[in-house]
Amino acid sequence: MKIEEERIEAEKLRVKEEAQQLALLFETVGGFKVKRKGGKGKQIFGRVKAQDLVDIIKSQLQREVDKRNVTLPEIRETGEYIAELKLHPEVTAKVRVIVLAN
């Protein structure tokens, strides 16, 4: 029984360490650029959603992130924003999202 508990604890620790490494990778990228059709001034058509960020992460870093674990502010104009990615119950990464108009 004790061996099984140790194995489970080791697996939990391994998963947490992987999440921490992934968080470090996301935070050192510098920012993810999202291009949208521009409107008047800084306005963009539509808005940037969590799925947009997930798609960019997958294409640039070949990493899977569940869109339900992405927290984005309301993005309806160009500029720089901070998104939070919950990678593990104890690990959260903050990434920059740079919104540009086409």
Image: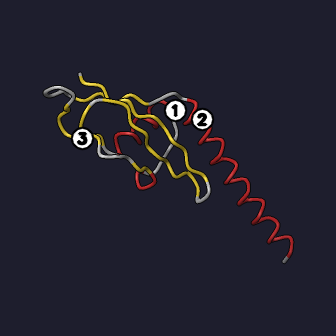
Viewport quadrant of the N terminus? bottom right
- Across and down, in percent, residue 3 comes to 86, 70
- Across and down, in percent, residue 61 comes to 52, 32
Q: Which residue is mark 1?
A: 61
Q: Earlier in the sequence, mark 3 or mark 2?
A: 2
| Residue projecting furthest to the left | 40
Residue type at tag 1: Leu
Residue at 30%, 25% (x, y): give it.
100
Q: How far apart in space, not on screen, are marks 3 and 1 (Cα)?
A: 23 Å
- Disc number placed over residue 25 in the picture, else none: 2
- Disc number placed over residue 47 in the picture, else none: 3
Frontmost of labels 2 and 1 is: 2
| Residue projecting furthest to the front | 41
Quarter of the image holding residue 89? bottom right
- Disc number placed over residue 78 in the picture, else none: none
Residue type at tag 3: Arg
- Across and down, in percent, residue 79 comes to 32, 30
Determine crowd level at label 3: few under 14, some 14-19, many 20+ residues with C-alpha closer than 10 A: some
Q: How far apart in space, not on screen, are marks 3 and 2 (Cα)?
A: 26 Å
Residue at 54%, 29% (x, y): give it.
29
Secondary structure of the residue carrying tag 3 is: strand
Residue toward you, 101 or 73: 73
Whether label 2 touches label 1, CB < 8 Å: yes
Q: How far apart in space, not on screen, are marks 2 and 1 (Cα)?
A: 9 Å
Whether label 3 touches label 1, CB < 8 Å: no
Residue toward you, 62 or 51: 51
